[in-house]
Image (tube, helix red, strand yellow):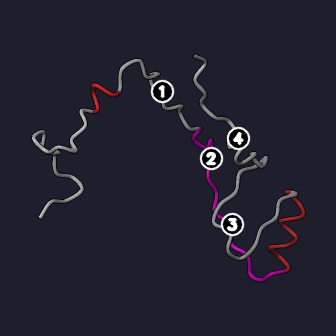
Amino acid sequence: MKTLFDLPDKNNEFYEDWEKEWQDMPEFKQLKTEKPYAQIIFRFANEKDLQDFSKIINQKLTNKTKSAWHPQIERGMNAYKIYTDES
């Protein structure tokens, strides 16, 4: 039984050589993600305390919030960027 990680069979009629298809493709460069300067865990005794803190930092926080940046970072700012071929 083949798995996802098995190498393709070059004798298969459906085999496509990715190196042949990859000619003239742009190089991919992974941007470095920003690491936090400091990380602090806050614990709140009740909902009111959480909402008071939420107002102080001007961010929406709930009992399901696992983490937040301060100041708040813009999520999805690159969501509408696409790659197009200029030829």
Which residue is located at x 88 percent, y 57 percent?
Answer: 58
Labelled pair 4, 3 in contact (Cβ < 8 Å): no
The span from disc 2 to disc 4 (Cα, nearest Å) is 30 Å
- Sooner in the amino-acid sequence: mark 2 or mark 1: 1
Quarter where residue 23 is shown: top left
Residue numbers of the magenta segment: 34-47
The span from disc 1 to disc 4 (Cα, nearest Å) is 19 Å
Q: Position of residue 73 (x, y in %)?
A: 74, 46
User: The C terminus appears in which quarter of the rendering?
Assistant: top right
The span from disc 1 to disc 3 (Cα, nearest Å) is 36 Å
Give the mark count: 4
What residue is shown with label 2? 38
- Sooner in the amino-acid sequence: mark 2 or mark 4: 2
What residue is shown with label 4? 80
Q: Which of marks 4 and 3 is in front?
A: 4
Magenta stretch holds residue 37: yes
User: The N terminus appears in which quarter of the rendering?
Assistant: bottom left
In the displayed orientation, state which residue is furthest to the front: 13
User: Local crowd at mark 3 within 10 Å, few (<14), some, or many (≥20)?
Assistant: few
Q: Is mark 3 on a helix, strand or loop?
A: loop
Q: What label does residue 42 carry, if any?
A: 3
What amino acid does circle 3 point to? Answer: Phe
